[in-house]
Image (cartoon, helix red, strand yellow):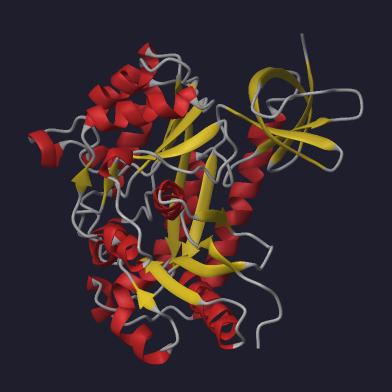
């Protein structure tokens, strides 16, 4: 029985997973708004007649979160609290037949590239003239810019090609147009995302064109920061760092997931590189851009990871001193190359190894942050929370990196503005400072 009146033309979009899903939800919401739907992102009003869940299917924890969310809204539909439930995204792409069988009261399941079909189900038209238009879910001063979809890499552990398909670069002119539109709406920071930034352009013109794209985006008026996420280490186009040095609005920042360091693991993971090449690449990057912030992601407990492999990983993390580092425990994913291997590292050992690596990184981060005390940094402010304005330096990406906290009691900072902040206190993952004129 319905407990309240539902707004027939109101859609609540729920987004799970990574920044690519955020981007996809924003595009979906832009199309719905253009079709005169009242669309909200993760609304708590509970008066939408239609709920669309954009799912993640990357690893076990993410899949479980997506399934739990679908089940919760499926029960809400049973109780008459919503009229229609639609599921899209990676989990739906990968497991559609199973989901249709197990959760039959979902109205429709769509994959990652089914936006026109999804809209048609709602009686909406896909508006080609709105390519690049989005309804931002991030604060208005920063936005993700997806420069490519899919991935051609053969990494043994990764299910992304199963869910996102082959690599497809977005033409540069479209990206520049998107960037200009975003800048006109007040966006100051672009965070470039893809499954692999460094592959950009190979499918269009047979060569890696990330450096050329960066120059074009750098020329867009109003964009103060351009940040690079998800760069693959093999075949890295080193000219990117020449552009980084040339252009002040390209952040000295790179997110480059390396996954492991031993030759044994890299070969089994099918990463197309070696320990020596990886170390040489990191050293070359730091030589080209002194002071660059390097973020990486690792995997703990991949099949066959021995104590010796893990000891070598620890030593390398300690020696390399990444500015930012995250680590996942290995997830045994169906239809990946690694699924044919025995998942022989116990879950408890995976977790212990991940915690050990993060303990090392916590100490490194504390040291790096302590060295910033007394220095002044250009800081972009994202929000006010409690007694503090909270911002980020060039070295920090939203959600995943450090933050700068400025006490609000005697200071006013407009959200979305830059300010120079002098750091007076450092913790492992946060900095405290005060604005300077």
Task: Give the x, y percent position of residue 229.
Answer: 41, 40
Left or right: residue 44 versus residue 88 is: right
Is 304 rendered above or below residue 130? below
In the rendered view, does 240 fall on the left or right side of 55? left
* Image quadrant where residue 102 sits: bottom left
Q: In this rendering, does residue 75 appear at all?
A: yes
At a point 25% along the width and 72% down the height, the residue shown is 336
In the picture, the quarter occupied by the C terminus is top right
Residue situated in front as seen by the camera: 315 or 130: 130
Front residue of 199/168: it is 168
Q: Residue at x 35, y 73 (%)?
A: 92
Instruction: Locate residue 436, reporting x and y percent.
Output: 77, 13
Quadrant in which residue 105 is drawn: bottom left
**Most extreme residue toward the top, as rendered?**
437
Residue at 86% x, 30% y: name it. 408
Q: Work out whether residue 158 can be spotted.
A: no
Q: Residue at x 22, y 38 (%)?
A: 200
Residue 83: x, y in percent? Answer: 52, 77
- Nearest to the observer: residue 188 or residue 119: 119
């Amino acid at each position: 029985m319905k407990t309240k009146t539902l707004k027939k033309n109101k859609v609540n979009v729920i987004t799970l997973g990574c920044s690519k899903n955020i981007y996809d939800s924003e595009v979906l919401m832009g199309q719905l708004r253009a079709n005169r739907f009242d669309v909200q992102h993760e609304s708590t009003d509970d008066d939408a007649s239609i709920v669309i869940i954009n799912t993640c299917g990357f690893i076990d924890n993410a899949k479980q979160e997506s399934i739990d969310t679908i089940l919760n809204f499926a029960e809400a539909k049973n109780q008459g609290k919503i009229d229609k439930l639609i599921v899209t995204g990676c989990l739906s792409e990968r497991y559609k037949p199973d989901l249709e069988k197990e959760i039959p009261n979902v109205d429709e399941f769509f994959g990652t590239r089914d936006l026109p079909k999804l809209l048609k189900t709602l009686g909406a038209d896909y508006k080609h003239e709105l390519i690049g238009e989005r309804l931002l879910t991030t604060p208005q001063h920063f936005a993700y810019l997806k420069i490519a979809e899919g991935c051609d890499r053969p990494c043994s552990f990764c299910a992304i090609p199963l869910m996102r398909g082959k690599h497809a670069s977005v033409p540069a002119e479209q990206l520049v147009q998107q960037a200009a539109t975003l800048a006109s709406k007040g966006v100051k920071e672009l965070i470039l995302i893809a499954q692999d930034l460094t592959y950009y352009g190979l499918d269009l013109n047979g060569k890696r064109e990330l450096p050329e794209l960066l120059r074009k985006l750098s020329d867009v008026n109003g964009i103060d920061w351009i940040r690079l996420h998800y760069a693959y280490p093999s075949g890295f186009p080193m000219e990117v760092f020449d552009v980084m040095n040339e252009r002040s609005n390209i952040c000295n920042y790179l997110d480059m997931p390396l996954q492991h360091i031993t030759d044994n693991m890299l070969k089994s993971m099918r990463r197309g590189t070696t320990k020596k090449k990886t170390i040489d690449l990191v050293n070359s990057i730091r030589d080209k851009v002194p002071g660059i912030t390097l973020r990486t992601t690792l995997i703990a407990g991949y099949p066959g990871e021995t104590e010796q492999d893990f000891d070598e990983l620890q030593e390398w993390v300690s020696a390399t001193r990444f500015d930012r580092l995250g680590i996942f425990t290995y997830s045994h994913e169906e239809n990946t190359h690694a699924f044919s291997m025995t998942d022989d590292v116990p879950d408890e050992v995976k977790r212990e190894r991940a915690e050990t690596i993060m303990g090392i990184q916590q100490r490194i981060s504390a040291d790096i942050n302590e060295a910033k005390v007394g220095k002044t940094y250009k800081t972009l402010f994202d929000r006010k929370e409690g007694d503090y304005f909270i911002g980020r330096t060039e070295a920090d990406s939203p959600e995943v990196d450090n933050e700068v906290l400025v006490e609000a009691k005697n200071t006013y900072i407009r959200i979305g503005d830059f300010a120079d902040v002098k750091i007076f206190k450092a913790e492992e993952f946060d900095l405290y400072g005060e604005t300077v004129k």
